[in-house]
Amino acid sequence: MPKIKVFASLVNGDMWDPLDEEATCEDALELICGDDMRPPPTSVVIKVITESGKVVELRIPNSSSGKASVRIDGKAV
């Protein structure tokens, strides 16, 4: 089963870690979108454009068994 980790470094030096060690992609989507969105999302895409202009996309499927994927400038990594 794929696992996912979501965390944030806080300004006071602490780490916010809202998901447990066995979290799935489906758990991460619930964290981001909530559980009352209708119709539910099929996935979430986090897109970042780096300082050098590269486009990085992280796609997280709404699935307990699905695998997240990464693309850089449209190419799978």
Image (cartoon, helix red, strand yellow):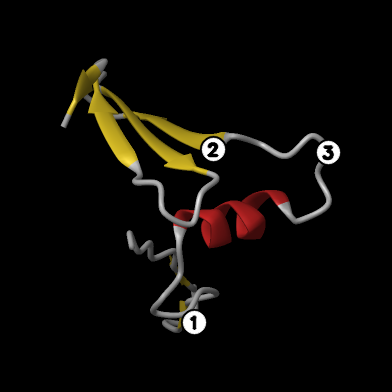
Mark closer to the chain start, 3 or 2: 3
**Mark 3 vs mark 2, CA separation in Å:** 14 Å
| Picture coordinates of residue 68, whole percent (x, y) | 35, 44
Q: Quadrant of the C terminus?
A: top left
Q: Which residue is mark 2?
A: 44
- Local packing at callout 2 (Cα closer than 10 Å; few below 14, some 14-19, many 20+) is some
On screen, residue 67 above or below 4: above
Of 8 and 69, which appears nearest the observer? 69
Q: Which residue is mark 3?
A: 38
Q: Amino acid type of disc 1?
A: Asn
On screen, residue 6 above or below 33: below
The numbered disc on residue 28 is none
User: Which residue corresponds to the image point at 53% horizontal and 58% vertical from the top-left?
Assistant: 28
User: Which residue corresponds to the image point at 49% horizontal and 82% vertical from the top-left?
Assistant: 12
Q: Which residue is mark 1?
A: 12
- Local packing at callout 3 (Cα closer than 10 Å; few below 14, some 14-19, many 20+) is few
On screen, residue 9 above or below 13: above
